[in-house]
């Protein structure tokens, strides 16, 4: 694991929204450039959060509660 990649991932979870149990988004291209999907998913799992990938975005739900996909 690259130190700069890990720093970049850690910065996502230092964001105010993440600390308050909100939602953070990162572009797929940005994640691929600065870290990797694997590092992001591992970090999300370590925090018991949830992540969804769309065509262009990763959406991290910074909450460990149950989720229900409505559509």
Image: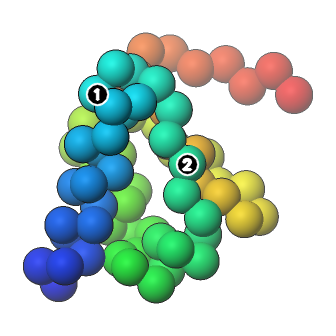
Q: Is residue 18 above or below residue 10?
A: above
| Numbered tag placed on residue 11 in the rendering | none
Whether residue 45 is visible to the viewer of this picture, yes or no, is no
Q: Residue at x 46, y 25 (%)?
A: 22
- Per the model, the C-alpha gap separating discs 2 and 1 is 14 Å
Q: Between residues 4 and 51, which one lies in front from this camera angle?
A: 4
In the drawing, does residue 15 fall left or right of residue 23? left
Q: Which image quadrant: the N terminus?
A: bottom left
Q: Which image quadrant: the C terminus?
A: top right
In the drawing, does residue 5 fall left or right of residue 51? left
Q: Residue at x 50, y 15 (%)?
A: 66
Name the residue furthest left: 3
Q: Earlier in the sequence, mark 2 or mark 1?
A: 1
Residue wearing tag 2: 25
Residue wearing tag 1: 19
In the drawing, does residue 29 fall left or right of residue 3? right
**Element at badge 1?**
helix
- Picture coordinates of residue 64, whole percent (x, y): 37, 22
**Element at badge 2?**
strand
Q: Is residue 17 above or below residue 45?
A: above
């Amino acid at each position: 694991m690259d130190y700069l990649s890990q720093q970049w991932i850690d910065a996502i979870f230092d964001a105010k929204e993440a600390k308050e149990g909100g939602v953070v988004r990162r572009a797929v291209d940005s994640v691929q450039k600065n870290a990797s999907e694997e590092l992001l998913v591992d970090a999300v799992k370590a925090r018991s959060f949830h992540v969804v990938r769309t065509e262009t975005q990763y959406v991290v739900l910074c909450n460990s509660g149950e989720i229900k996909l409505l559509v």
